[in-house]
Image: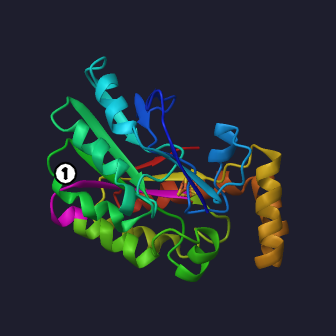
Amino acid sequence: MEIKNVLCKSVLSRSGLKDSKFSINPYRGCSHSCIYCYAPYILREGRKWGTFVDIKTNAPEVLEKELKKIESGTVLISSVTDPYQPLERKYEITRKILEKLKGKKLFISILTKSSLVLRDLDLLKQLNCEVGITITTLNDNIRKLFEPNASSVESRLDTLKKLKEVGIKTYIFFGPMLPFISDKNLEETLKLFSALGPEKIYFDKLNVKNPFQWKKIKTFLEENYVDLAEKWEKAISNNYYKELKEKIIEICKNLSLNYEICY
Ligand code: SF4
């Protein structure tokens, strides 16, 4: 892993996302190395994703200045990296950013695949915030393949439970829904999610708009899930996600879940 300290000129970006006015990415690159990650294509990053992380060492100070120019809105941490990837334990850039956000009239939405977020409970309790945990499967052997360096499934579920116990609002980002994996025992999975008390469950599909990304996923499937490579190819080009959407809506309605389908 190539780790580099970098100085950023700006860290608070206008977000094009529906629910967030701003986003903050304390790092460029992400060592969680999820197979399906599309961040490198958004960033037009030429380096191999998962092999490098740039640490924006001056991000907290830069943010402090930028915060003087804004008054309100939702800030997403993070949109194209994981703010609690393993390096955060040592560098604490996300933690220092949260410190700068204390006392501001902003709503902070954190999204991560890491239980490291629990380290910052003291700060989270002082912020107007919510914490989202991404989950794509309940099977940790599959998780290890698709998200090799992120927290285990058990640890993510436990994180949601602990956050709820101390009164922090939570949500679950169930995505990308991996065809024929995420939807296995969907009703039972959603019942389990519901028992953890999230404010909302978001669903998203696999983003394979970039042909290079699909090529990477397909190669991965051919090496690890031979039978799925062809099935996924068909799924993403036909009605799979449309039918899944109908199934999600039916189950969520039956279970009275607050949900949003992002695709
Ligand atoms: S955690 Fe998010 S940003 Fe990091 S590799 Fe996975 S999908 Fe990409």
Near-viewer residue (176 or 36): 36
Near-viewer residue (231 or 151): 151
Residue 209 belongs to magenta span? no
Q: Position of residue 246 (x, y in %)?
A: 57, 54
- Region of the chain picked out in magenta, as a range: 163-175
Above-or-below relation of 31 to 139: above
Split into quadrants, the picture shows ligand 1 in the one at bottom right
Above-or-below relation of 182 to 91: below
Q: Tell me the quarter of the image containing the C terminus.
A: top right
Q: Position of residue 72 (x, y in %)?
A: 27, 24
Scheme of colours in the image: rainbow
Q: Which residue is most to the bottom?
A: 141
Tell me, yes or no, if residue 238 can be seen here: no
> Going by the image, does 221 lie left or right of 69?
right
Tell me, yes or no, if residue 170 can be seen here: yes
What residue is disc 1 on? 123
Near-viewer residue (56 or 205): 56
> Going by the image, does 133 lie left or right of 184?
left
